[in-house]
């Protein structure tokens, strides 16, 4: 009997696994919430009013719907009224914005973690925005908005140094660009979100349309199903990216422990698991970091080269060359995931 492989999620990780397995001797089913591939790393561009292409997913073996539950004992995935049996399950459901840790975020803030919210933000016409969170997503969102709308007042709330995980050279360039774009940085932690306003732990209040980029979370589905997860709900995996509690389940991308959430690791994780299931490798996974690319609008950027463990090296690229490199990598990632 042909092995039944079910992939949950068709983001960078899930789609790259599917691409490898389409040529293998398996019966492949891909479950995804929508019928197209969304370039998540471009959603800040969508929010800023730019047109971004969305690629249709291959129709054969595609089930469009939301995963309601996983029956690990009987090896069945529940999608609406459908029951999809599997022999091997690939869990690649990714992450979403953490909108429940701070009061008011879910009700009053926009995010750029999914296409729907980014599109809603795009439809707004504010005179001032407050971007909460100064990680990679927050920095890219703030600079994209500032470049596209020069008259828009952009505030960036940072709970620590902006780009503090980068080298001193990269941080210096970030600070220079933020100043040039008139992006005002506020240090503090947001404790409450109201309509068009946030309150910091210092008591200071900032007015403007709120864009929340302060953290991501994974669905509770894995925990509810009975898979071994860590404190954040990510599936605990072994060196072959198999669940330590259920070896017939693989976890890749943001859903799996051990690696920073990023497209950079999601793609190779997906391709690796596809090769393992197809019988093309038995070696343990070796997922290494190379760089971190941060776009600062369409004409500037910073590329931080890293060691394999993701710690920053001295080498940094900035300016137009970095912006071009980021665009090249983004296009390559989308192409690689879909091939």
Image (spheres, rainbow, N blue to C red):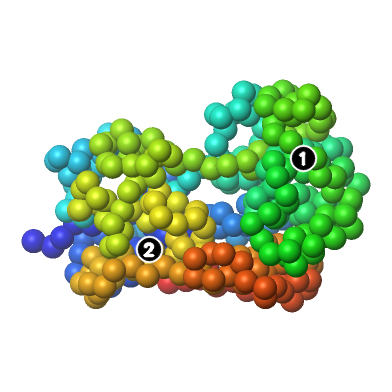
Residue 126: x %, y % from top left? 82, 37
Quarter that holds the N terminus: bottom left
Q: Please give the residue where the numbered disc 1 appears in the rendered image.
A: 187
* Residue 186 on image: x %, y %: 80, 40
Q: Is residue 248 above or below residue 214?
A: below
Asked if residue 44 shows in the view, the reply is: no
Q: Are marks 1 and 2 in contact (CB under 8 Å)?
A: no
Mark 1 Cα shell of 10 Å, populated few (<14), some (14-19), many (≥20): some
In the displayed structure image, the side of residue 309 where residue 16 appears, left or right: left
Q: Is residue 238 or residue 121 the one in the foreground?
A: 238
Q: Is residue 138 above or below residue 295?
A: above
Percent across and percent down for residue 335 are: 51, 70
Residue 191 seen in the current view:
yes
Residue 107, percent from left and from top: 62, 25
C-alpha separation, residue under disc 1 versus residue under disc 2:
37 Å
Q: Which residue is most to the left?
A: 1
Query: In the picture provided, is 218 more to the left or to the right than 49?
Result: left
Residue under the image location 13 percent in, 62 percent down: 2
Q: Earlier in the sequence, mark 1 or mark 2?
A: 1
Residue where numbered disc 2 is placed: 270
Rendered residue at 79%/64% (across/down)? 173
Q: Quadrant of residue 157?
A: top right
Q: Residue at x 68, y 54 (%)?
A: 164
Callout 2: SS: helix
């Amino acid at each position: 009997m042909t092995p039944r492989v079910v992939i949950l999620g068709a983001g960078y990780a899930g789609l790259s696994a599917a691409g490898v397995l389409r040529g293998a001797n398996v019966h492949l089913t891909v479950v995804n919430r929508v019928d197209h591939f969304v370039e998540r790393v471009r959603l800040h561009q969508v929010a800023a009013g730019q047109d971004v292409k969305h690629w249709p997913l291959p129709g054969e073996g595609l089930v469009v719907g939301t995963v309601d539950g996983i029956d690990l004992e009987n090896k069945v995935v529940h999608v609406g009224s459908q029951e999809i049996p599997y022999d091997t399950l690939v869990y690649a459901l990714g992450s979403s914005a953490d909108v429940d840790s701070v009061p008011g975020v879910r009700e009053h803030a926009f995010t750029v973690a999914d296409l729907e919210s980014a599109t809603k933000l795009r439809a707004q016409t504010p005179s001032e925005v407050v971007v909460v969170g100064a990680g990679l997503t927050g920095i890219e969102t703030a600079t994209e908005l500032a470049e596209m709308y020069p008259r828009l007042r952009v505030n960036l709330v940072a709970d620590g140094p902006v780009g503090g995980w980068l080298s001193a050279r990269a941080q210096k360039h970030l600070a220079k660009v933020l100043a040039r774009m008139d992006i005002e940085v506020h240090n503090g932690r947001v404790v409450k979100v109201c309509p068009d306003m946030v309150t910091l732990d210092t008591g200071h209040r900032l007015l403007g349309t709120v864009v929340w980029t302060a953290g991501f979370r994974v669905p509770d589905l894995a925990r509810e199903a009975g898979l071994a997860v860590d404190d954040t709900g990510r599936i605990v995996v072994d060196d072959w990216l198999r669940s330590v509690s259920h070896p017939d389940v693989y976890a890749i991308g943001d859903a799996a422990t051990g690696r920073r959430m990023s497209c950079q690791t999601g793609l190779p994780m997906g391709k690796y698991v596809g090769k393992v299931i197809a019988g093309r490798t038995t070696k343990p996974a070796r997922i290494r970091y190379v760089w971190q690319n941060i776009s600062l609008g369409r004409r500037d950027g910073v590329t931080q080269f890293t060691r394999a463990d993701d710690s920053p090296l001295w080498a940094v690229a900035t300016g137009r060359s970095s912006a071009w490199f980021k665009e090249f990598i983004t296009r390559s990632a989308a192409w690689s995931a879909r091939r």
